[in-house]
Image (cartoon, rainbow, N blue to C red):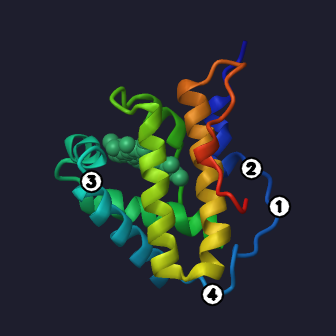
Amino acid sequence: MADNSADLVNLDARPAGNRDPVHPSITEELISRLVEQFYAKARQDERLGPLFDTRINDRWPMHLDRMKNFWSSVLLKSGRYKGKPVPVHMAIEDIKSDDFRLWLRLFRETAIDVLGQDAAVPTIIAAERIAQSLWLAKFATPFDPVPDWMFSKSA
Ligand code: HEM
């Protein structure tokens, strides 16, 4: 059977759809701050820090640029990111299911801090959906439900 899992978050493979930003107040400048602040915190996290640092090592400037392009594509529909996150995360064997909970907790808190509550809501929902795709590709059998903590209570 063909394995299409990589297409789940391959933004290139998606039909054009709705090209509007997820919220009118989001700018490239805010996305840059969101990414810088999120990874500054993630690197200080006891569990997530080593997961990122071991792998990224001296490539942090490139990773941050790539993540700014990624979030610009997701939030502003700019098309700046070209890549396939699923195989990248599949290849990181050390990632455990619970690491997605820690990642989302940090992301939610950073998004509210940097973007404010209104713009953070659609941003967090987008992050949760992508995290769910990555989690499903990495951990799920056809009968596994996505854990509750992958959804905001309001989503
Ligand atoms: C368990 C939590 C996660 C961990 C530990 C993690 C770790 C990593 C690492 C180490 C890389 C760099 C790979 C490399 O360049 O060698 C990476 C890349 C990336 N991550 Fe994650 N990640 C996590 C969750 C997420 C989530 C939830 C998203 C999206 C909402 C995401 C989006 C991306 C993207 C877009 C890339 C770049 C892929 C590319 O090379 O094109 N990650 N991640």
**SS type, badge 3:** loop
- Disc 4 crowd rating (10 Å Cα; few below 14, some 14-19, many 20+) is few
Residue furthest to the bottom in view is 25
Left or right? Give the position of 85 relative to 14: left
- Gap in angstroms between the C-alphas marked 3 and 4: 29 Å
Whole-percent x, y for residue 1 in the image: 73, 12
- Gap in angstroms between the C-alphas marked 2 and 1: 8 Å
Q: Which residue is mark 1?
A: 17
Q: Nearer the viewer, residue 77 or 97?
A: 97
Q: Nearer the viewer, residue 47 or 35?
A: 47
- Gap in angstroms between the C-alphas marked 4 and 1: 21 Å
Q: Measured along the vertical axis of the image, is residue 125 above or below residue 11? A: below
Q: Is mark 3 within 8 Å of ligand 1?
A: no
| Type of amino acid at the residue the image marks with label 3 | Asp
- Gap in angstroms between the C-alphas marked 2 and 3: 34 Å
Identified at 53% across, 42% down, the residue is: 84
Q: Nearer the viewer, residue 137 or 107?
A: 107
Residue 142's disc number: none
Residue furthest to the left in view is 58
Identified at 61% across, 37% down, the residue is: 147
| Type of amino acid at the residue the image marks with label 2 | Arg
Q: Are marks 2 and 1 in contact (CB under 8 Å)?
A: yes
Q: Which residue is mark 3?
A: 45
Q: Which residue is mark 4?
A: 25
Q: Quadrant of residue 5?
A: top right
- Gap in angstroms between the C-alphas marked 2 and 4: 24 Å
**SS type, badge 2:** loop
Q: Which residue is mark 2?
A: 14
Whole-percent x, y for residue 47 in the image: 28, 44
> N-terminal of the two: label 3 or label 4?
4
